[in-house]
Structures are given as C-alpha cells and as structure tokens.
Image (cartoon, rainbow, N blue to C red):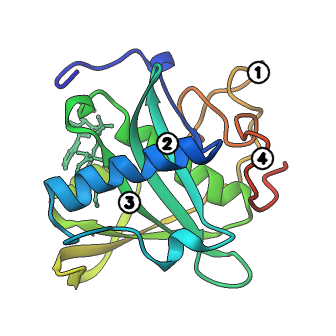
Amino acid sequence: MTGLRAPGDLLFCRLVAEPGELAIHHRIRHQIFVGEQQLFPESDVDAHDAREDVLHVLGWCGEVPAGTVRLYPLDAGGSSWQGDRLAVLPEFRAAGLGTPLVRFAVATAGRLGGVSMLAHVQVANERFFTRLGWTRQGDVELYVGRLHLLMTIALPTCTEPAVGQEGSTGLGCQRGGDPVQRRTPGVRKPDLGQ
Ligand SMILES: CC(C)(COP(=O)(O)OP(=O)(O)OC[C@H]1O[C@@H](n2cnc3c(N)ncnc32)[C@H](O)[C@@H]1OP(=O)(O)O)[C@@H](O)C(=O)NCCC(=O)NCCS
C-alpha cells in the first residue's frame, strides 16, 4: 500500500465499536509507539485510556483497520481537547489515511462543543499538521522524552449533514464516514448527537 493513494471511499474513520476493535486500536498503537518508535518501553497505554470521556478511533482501509487516533477533553466544560496517538501502520502510510484520522478527531471534538484542540506533534510531522491547518505554538518541547511541538487548531462548528447524505461535502469532518452516523451502539461515550 505504501506509495499508493487509496480511493477516498476505501478510507474511513470511526469510533471503536466494541472491545475487539478497542484491542485492535491498542495493538496498532503498541506496534507504532512501543515497537517502531520506541517512545514507550513497554506500553503506551496511560490513564487517559481509562477515562469515561476518552474517544478511541480506528482508521480503516477497506476492511482493514490500519490507523488510530485518540481524543479527550482537557477541561470540564469540554472546550479544549487533546488529540494524540495518531498512527498509521507502515504498509498503509501515504495512502491518505493519516489525513482523515486527524480530520475525524477535529470534527468529532467540534461536534461535541469543543473550541480548540492541541497536539504534541513530533517535529518530523510539523509539515503534515501545518498542511491540515494546525498552527505551531512556541518552541520545541520535550514530550515523552522526544522533541515535539505544541500545535493547535480551532475546532469547526460541524453543521454539515452526514457524509453520504445529500448536500454533504465531507468538509473537514472526515472522509468516508461520519462520527455521529457511524457510532455503534454499546460504546458508552458522551452524547454525539447533533
Ligand atoms: C504521521 C502519519 C500519521 C501520517 O499518516 P499517513 O497516512 O502517511 O498520512 P497521509 O497519507 O494522509 O499524508 C497526507 C500527505 O502528507 C504527507 N505526509 C505524511 N507524513 C508527513 C510528514 N511527516 N511530513 C510531511 N508530510 C507528510 C504525505 O506524503 C501526503 O502528501 P500528499 O498529499 O502530497 O501526497 C504516519 O506517517 C505515521 O503513523 N507515522 C508514525 C507515527 C507518528 O509519527 N505519529 C504522529 C505523532 S505526532
């Protein structure tokens, strides 16, 4: 898959739907952040993963789960959000999945009333985020022992109809899936209603 751009309709993102998908989400994160990047010696799971209000996302390339992102509010009012654990399996990189994963996180936090999102971005990924509308804040920082940049983005007020419905442009919400429409019953999460 590397080097090939997958057709947009093959790529979609959605919240994990059941424990099996959550396990896959964690397996991908472990492969990238513990195995490939060695950011964490044993596990990248932290206290945020156990929060009631954390949202775990899987990015799919067709039937294959190939990427992750995680998001959660930073304040009680839910205005400021953090996105992290963005990862795409090596064999799926540059297929266009990282982009909708970031956009899905942004759109989802926006739908939940968020105003801004921040991310601690690895220096090598600054351009990737800049191209998606993120802005660097300040100097290089040490985060989980590596050089990162604090980057932020204003969250959209996402009033678009769901992707696939008439009139939808897909906007920055995400490609090929809607955070509301694709939420699967059984996942106890904050109200994702319109
Ligand atoms: C960073 C990452 C998520 C990008 O995912 P991806 O699926 O390869 O990204 P996309 O295919 O959507 O890339 C979209 C565009 O950004 C470019 N791009 C990807 N990574 C980039 C980077 N680090 N710097 C600059 N451009 C980048 C792609 O080449 C593509 O360009 P194009 O539209 O001109 O073809 C992926 O490389 C990854 O998982 N890396 C390891 C984990 C990691 O670093 N996570 C982020 C921590 S901050």
Mark 2 and mark 1: Cα distance apart in space: 22 Å
What crowding class fits label 2: few (fewer than 14 Cα within 10 Å), some (14-19), or many (20 or more)?
A: many
Name the residue located 60 percent from the left edge and 41 percent from the top edge. Answer: 173
Reading the image, the residue beneath label 4 is 186
- Give the residue type that dot 2 points to: Leu
Find numbered disc 4 in the image and state the secondary structure of the residue it sits on: loop
Reading the image, the residue beneath label 1 is 165
Mark 3 and mark 2: Cα distance apart in space: 11 Å
Reading the image, the residue beneath label 2 is 58
- Quarter residue 95 falls in: top left
**Mark 2: is the Cβ under 8 angstroms from ligand 1?**
no
User: Can residue 126 be seen?
Assistant: no
Of label 4 and label 2, which has the lower sequence position? 2
Mark 4 and mark 2: Cα distance apart in space: 16 Å
- In percent of width and height, residue 153 lies at 48, 64
What crowding class fits label 4: few (fewer than 14 Cα within 10 Å), some (14-19), or many (20 or more)?
A: few
Find numbered disc 2 in the image and state the secondary structure of the residue it sits on: strand
Left or right, 154 with respect to 88, comes to: right
> Which is nearer the eye, 59 or 171?
59
Mark 1 and mark 3: Cα distance apart in space: 30 Å
Of label 1 and label 3, which has the lower sequence position? 3
